[in-house]
Image (cartoon, rainbow, N blue to C red):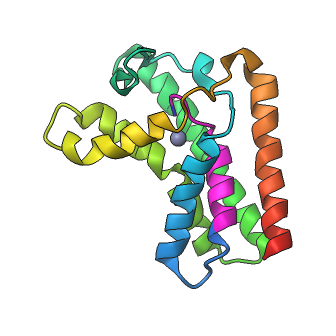
C-alpha cells in the first residue's frame, strides 16, 4: 500500500505461487502471503504519488497513516480498482496454470492480505491490538527499507512490476 507494490502485482504473484499447493488451502494461503513480503523486498516504485491521504514520516515509518478525510475516498477507489484488477487477473492466472479459480483466489487474497493488515494496523495501533499487529508491521516496513524507487516514476515502476508478475508466472509454469 503505502510502500508496497501494486495490489495487482501482489494478487497475480500470490495466485501463481498458490498453484504449488492445489489441494492444500492453508499452504496456498501461506505461499501467497509470503510472496507478498518476498517481492516487497525487491527494488520497486510504490504508487505514492497517486495517493493523497497517506501521511509518511521517513524517520518513523511505523507512524505512517492513511487519514480519513477528503482524499481518503479517492485513494480507496484507486486501491479498490487496483485490487479488483488483481482478482480479475487471478482468473486468467488460474486458466494459464490449470488450477481452480478457488485456489487462484485464495492465493490472490493472501497476496494482498499483508496490505489489509497494514491498513488495520494504521487504524488500530492505538488500541491493545497493537501488541499483536506491530511485529508484522515492523517486518513489513523493514523488508522494504532502501528498496523504494520513487524516482523511477510510474511508467518504469509499473512496467517493471508487470514484467516481474509475468516473469514469475512463466517461472512457475516451467518449474511446476
Ligand atoms: Zn507490502
- In the rendered image, the vertical position of residue 77 relative to residue 12, given as above or below: above
Give the residues in magenta.
Answer: 2-17
Q: Residue 9 at what x, y percent from top left? A: 68, 46
Q: Residue 90 at what x, y percent from top left? A: 68, 60
- In the rendered image, the vertical position of residue 96 relative to residue 75, given as above or below: below
Residue displayed at 51% across by 57% down: 33
Residue displayed at 63% across by 29% down: 147
Q: Is 4 one of the magenta-colored residues?
A: yes
State the predominant SS element of the stretch in magenta. helix
Query: Residue lying furthest left in this view?
Result: 128
Q: Is 67 one of the magenta-colored residues?
A: no
Q: Is residue 80 left or right of residue 121?
A: right
Q: Is residue 96 visible?
A: no
Q: Is residue 5 left or right of residue 121?
A: right
- Which quadrant is the C terminus positioned in? bottom right
Q: Residue 157 at what x, y percent from top left? A: 75, 28
Q: Is residue 19 left or right of residue 69?
A: right
Tell me the quarter of the picture where residue 146 sits.
top right
Tell me the quarter of the picture where residue 64 sits.
top left
Q: Is residue 36 visible?
A: yes
Residue displayed at 37% across by 46% down: 136
Amino acid at each position: 500500500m503505502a510502500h508496497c507494490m501494486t495490489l495487482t502485482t501482489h494478487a497475480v504473484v500470490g495466485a501463481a505461487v498458490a498453484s504449488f499447493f492445489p489441494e492444500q488451502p492453508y499452504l496456498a494461503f501461506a505461499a501467497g502471503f509470503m510472496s507478498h513480503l518476498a517481492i516487497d523486498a525487491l527494488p520497486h516504485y510504490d504508487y505514492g504519488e497517486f495517493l493523497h491521504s497517506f501521511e509518511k514520516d521517513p524517520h518513523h515509518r511505523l507512524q505512517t497513516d492513511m487519514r480519513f478525510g477528503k482524499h481518503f475516498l479517492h485513494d480507496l477507489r484507486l486501491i479498490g480498482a487496483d485490487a479488483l484488477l488483481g482478482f480479475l487477473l487471478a482468473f486468467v492466472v488460474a486458466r494459464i496454470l490449470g488450477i481452480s479459480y478457488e485456489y487462484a483466489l485464495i492465493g490472490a487474497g493472501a497476496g494482498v492480505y499483508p496490505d489489509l493488515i497494514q491498513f488495520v494496523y494504521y487504524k488500530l495501533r492505538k488500541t491493545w491490538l497493537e501488541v499483536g499487529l506491530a511485529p508484522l508491521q515492523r517486518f513489513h516496513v523493514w523488508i522494504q527499507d532502501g528498496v523504494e524507487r520513487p524516482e523511477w516514476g510510474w511508467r518504469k515502476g509499473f512496467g517493471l512490476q508487470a514484467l516481474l508478475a509475468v516473469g514469475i508466472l512463466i517461472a512457475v509454469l516451467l518449474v511446476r
